[in-house]
Amino acid sequence: MAAKNRQIVLASRPQGAPQEANFRLVESEIPQPAEGQFLVKTHYLSVDPYMRGRISEAKSYADPVGIGDVMVGGTVGTVIESRHAKYQAGDVVVGNGGWQEFSLSNGEGVYRFDASMAPMSTALGVLGMPGMTAYFGLLDIGRPQPGETVFVSGAAGAVGSVVGQIAKIHGCRAVGSAGSQDKVDHLVNDLGFDAAFNYKNVKDYAAKLQEVCPGGIDVYFDNVGGPLTDAVFTQLKLRGRVVVCGQIDQYNAEKPPQGPRLLWHLIVKRARAEGFLVFDYFSRFPEAMCDMAGWLQEGKLQYRETITDGLENAPRAFIGLFQGENLGKQLVRIVKE
Amino acid sequence: MAAKNRQIVLASRPQGAPQEANFRLVESEIPQPAEGQFLVKTHYLSVDPYMRGRISEAKSYADPVGIGDVMVGGTVGTVIESRHAKYQAGDVVVGNGGWQEFSLSNGEGVYRFDASMAPMSTALGVLGMPGMTAYFGLLDIGRPQPGETVFVSGAAGAVGSVVGQIAKIHGCRAVGSAGSQDKVDHLVNDLGFDAAFNYKNVKDYAAKLQEVCPGGIDVYFDNVGGPLTDAVFTQLKLRGRVVVCGQIDQYNAEKPPQGPRLLWHLIVKRARAEGFLVFDYFSRFPEAMCDMAGWLQEGKLQYRETITDGLENAPRAFIGLFQGENLGKQLVRIVKE
């Protein structure tokens, strides 16, 4: 055990794309749990596109991270000391420990993870927030019916890869877009997508979508926004549903991004676009986890992880998300198991 | 009875805003009903913003009107000769007779109107397609709850004026925008809106919306699209609903209109935007009509009509819609009762 707690704090707010200089590594004393608290040693921490919003000045669905504050983020680790009635040393817990090696918790927003079910890292991926996002976004907002066509952008990411597989499990046709030929091959060959394309090689998105979704799109799970999403709106089927999950295309925009006006398509297609936040589904995580763990064990659900070692490399791993460097869930490993 | 049937046909497709030269008055023989048909003499015909889409080349939710074809549109009139089992001479019927004095029908899309319930003209307004649009759009898509704030754009129009009043009947706060001070006064003084503003006198829509909807907007009934709608998206409350009914701001656009990207707001607010077409609710018109006629009789629902006399003036009445000339439902009267 390190004698100090290493932490990554926000040094400055990024203008446009985040840079390593926006973050700083600091050391502090390992904190001691007070009554009702416990101390967690982090094994993995999660870096996710949504964090770009949390380090902007603008208030979004949560207050921004302050300058000098430890970066927020999901973590999985083990309780090493507890003065909390519900947790004991040795428990594996998922929570929001942030970008640091040790964190204190009072149990809020924390749950125990059954490490006999699947590797600890999955608690931040396929069985964690990204998996839950895919599950509730697709099933609760998208409501796919057997035989329908589900198109997902950012399909090789931690969320998108699960969306396509759940679509298949529900008897849908799953089609995805990703940013490299390797990712496209992975979607089709490993994950069972019916079709996929590399958006970086496509000039006319609408024509490409017509080719891969010839009858149109019933459910669009949108991780990216921007011009690809504009094209999808033109290819929606009657009563199509757009699950607005992420807009990574514009997270780094310095000015409010402009695009074609899309609402007219909703009238013509009697379609619906709906946003959601996975945190609103927290109380329903157990039901989803049960389904997902079952599909994992049956081999119906595959997952990939991109693992970066060392807390000091968390900023680089985060920045890489916007360059499409990750296949599946991007994690930072703090403790080698 | 005129010896001839006068008709307005589409002479050419408008570029941008429609002009009178896009239409032509022609005369033809009054048709004779074949077996299974009946002949209707039109009393009123309806001109509506949606017709702009029907005279564009682009296929929308229906095929475009062909050059030389009689303009489509809702009508109310009396059956003057029938070879149809269900209709008799003297019946008052609502249908899609188009812009002409006489029309044949086989009964499809036609229903009888009880003229003892309300004046015949209401069959095209508050008890017709605009009223049904307001009713189903607000209640079925918007699902307002008592105490919520409903904002409607184009609030002095045939649809918007009914939306605000139904919102009040359902215990909501109703706020609207319109294009003149007279209309604003009408909304607040005659129709019981809680607040209204003249969008033409407002530079900063978001600031104005904050003033008239201080807690934000739960349900937005969008008749206009464009910059006002952009501002509403920034003022949505958590789990807000956008009923996408019309986008009159862009019907005459010659190029695909651009604007700020709006989907991000749906994530932040866990909000929903949904389009609809009133025609999809045809089978449920009776239930709505029953509610609406009751509210009319109880004095809870007021309506205004702007009536233009003479078939030959239908193009001008239609063009006036885009200049905001109408208060309430714009009708063309063919037969003075």
Image (spheres, coloured by chain):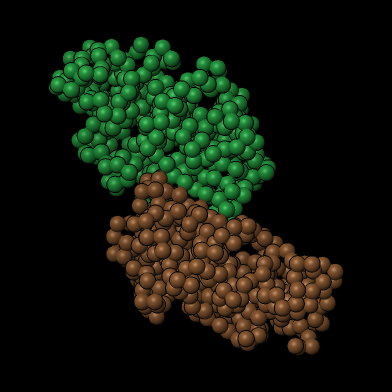
Chain colours: A green, B brown
Name the side, left or right, on which B85 lies relative to B183. right
B190 and B113: which is toward the camera: B113
Q: Position of residue B210 (x, y in %)?
A: 30, 61
- Above or below B306: residue B106: above
Q: Position of residue A155 (x, y in %)?
A: 52, 33
B153 and A64: which is toward the camera: B153
Q: Quadrant of residue B186?
A: bottom left
Residue B195 visible in the displayed image = yes
Q: Which residue: 61% across, 81% down?
A: B332
Residue A313 visible in the displayed image = no
Q: Which residue: 26% across, 42% down?
A: A63
B232 and B2: which is toward the camera: B2
Q: Position of residue B320 (x, y in %)?
A: 54, 79
Q: Position of residue B119 (x, y in %)?
A: 57, 78
Name the side, left or right, on which A227 lies relative to A33. right
Q: Which residue: 54% across, 45% down?
A: A241
Q: Which residue: 80% across, 81% down?
A: B30
Quadrant of the image containing the C terminus of chain A: top left
Give the total number of marks visible in the rendering. 0
Name the side, left or right, on which B310 lies relative to B290. right
List the single residue furthest toward the right: B35
Q: Quadrant of residue B74?
A: bottom right
- Above or below A278: residue A289: above
Quadrant of the image containing the N terminus of chain A: top left
